[in-house]
Amino acid sequence: MDAFIIQGPAKLAGKVRISGSKNAALPLLFTSLLFDEPVTYENVPRLWDIETTLSLMKSMGTESEWDKEGGKIVVHPKVTSRVAPYEWVKKMRAGILALGPLVAKFGEAQVSLPGGCAIGARPVNFHLDALQKLGAQVEVAEGYVRAKVPTRLLGTRIRFPEVTVTGTENLLIVALSAEGETILENAAREPEVVALGNLLISLGAKIEGLGTSTIHIQGGRLKAPRQAITIPPDRIETGTWIAIALATRQQLELEQCQAGEMKAVLDVFRAIGAGFEISSAGDRIVVLPRDKYNAVDVETQPYPGFATDMQAQVMALLCLASGKSRIRETIFENRFMHVAELRRLGAQIEIDGNNAIVTGPIDLQAAPMMATDLRASASLVVAALAAKGATRISRIYHLDRGYQRLDEKLRRLGAEITRVAE
Ligand code: EPZ
């Protein structure tokens, strides 16, 4: 396992190119299972979760070539097994995204139940209940979901009890194989759902309401992709870099981003005191730090609300803000694993249920920390770059799952960060 050694406070300057979005790339890659011809992807981020996705699909018979430096993948979907094995799904919960394409294409699937993870139990009952409403036979046995379509799925109205991003993505795909119209209510509005839906529309699908809570899908055949599928920029990586620039009080320029998808996150940073210069196309953001930051109240919500995937990184920044900030996590039941680690740097954070009260400003002091999950590890990097002294962050594989070579990008900006084997 690797660790980072980060010397703070970091002096940074320059431009950061934002990589392709992990949470857009995963559903788009699994969609290749619907087709028989090769599918090409561009601007694919170099992440462990992409590696895991290709390995999972390989275990089902597909082949793929990945030009990691060029960010290009060609998937040859030759599915010979309709089983998504525990061996891979246990490494990446998003393996549940194999369920939709397998049911849609073959009328059957066996997908390992994703385990829970550090941030919560992460059940998939909403996915399974929705499949049953469309007429699939679904059973859970020996840690696997077994889904089978007896004759034909029939479109119907499905209301998700809670907003589920991958649940919406799975059902968008399955509904295409159903007869008639399916209506998804309380559907996820995330840009990654819209990117998937727009791909399907470009291949002939009749889908209305993408980006709203109610999506109408007409069953019908899809054309195979003739053009490369470009992965859109990662809005969470963008937000993470804004937190880094503000916490280190260094002006940074972010390129190839999508400011238009980040209103709630940018509004929180502005309330804290950030200034931004944003290009008219929204693809370039200059982050303007301040000497003094304001304490704020933040509540995570499904998109277009403030993203839960940004909660940990903003908490690290709020340790430097003057006053008491309240952070309310409404999506996951255990997404405060970073709090104990931040306290080791001197942060003053009290937890009350799903609220965290952060008191600042604190001069963070370096101390060893341990990463526990993907976005928590990003939060520790934000804090370490602002802290005085050399901080060691262990179990950095959590970070490599979702950030393309963050240490290399930081070094290019002048950060003193080394990766050590432990
Ligand atoms: C997606 O996870 C993202 N992952 C997560 O990003 C993100 O945090 C999450 O959406 C919320 O925005 C990908 O897109 C690959 P949910 P997902 O289904 O789809 C409960 C990251 O850091 N729920 O929207 O798994 C669930 O427990 C990752 O990049 C059920 O109870 O999340 C959670 O409390 C972490 N039953 C809430 O709903 C279900 O069947 C939202 O979960 C499904 C979900």
Image (tube, rainbow, N blue to C red):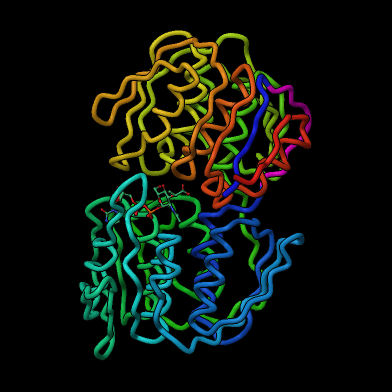
Q: Which x, y percent locates residue 281?
A: 68, 41
Name the residue: 67% across, 47% down: 405
Viewer-closest of 256 and 244: 244
- In the image: residue 6, left or right of residue 132: right
Q: Is 247 situated above or below 56?
A: above
Q: Is residue 374 magenta?
A: no
Indicate yes or no whether the magenta region holds residue 13.
Answer: yes
Q: Residue furthest front?
A: 422
Q: Nearer the viewer, residue 376 or 94?
A: 376
Identify the residue at horizontal 45%, vertical 50% (top origin).
190
Quarter of the rendering containing residue 278 = top right
Vertical arrangement, residue 221 with respect to residue 133, above or below: below
Q: Position of residue 400 (x, y in %)?
A: 58, 49
Q: Is residue 176 left or right of residue 385?
A: left
**What's the residue at 65%, 26% (across, down)?**
245
Horizontal and vertical percent position of residue 232? 61, 54
In screen coordinates, is 173 left or right of 40? left
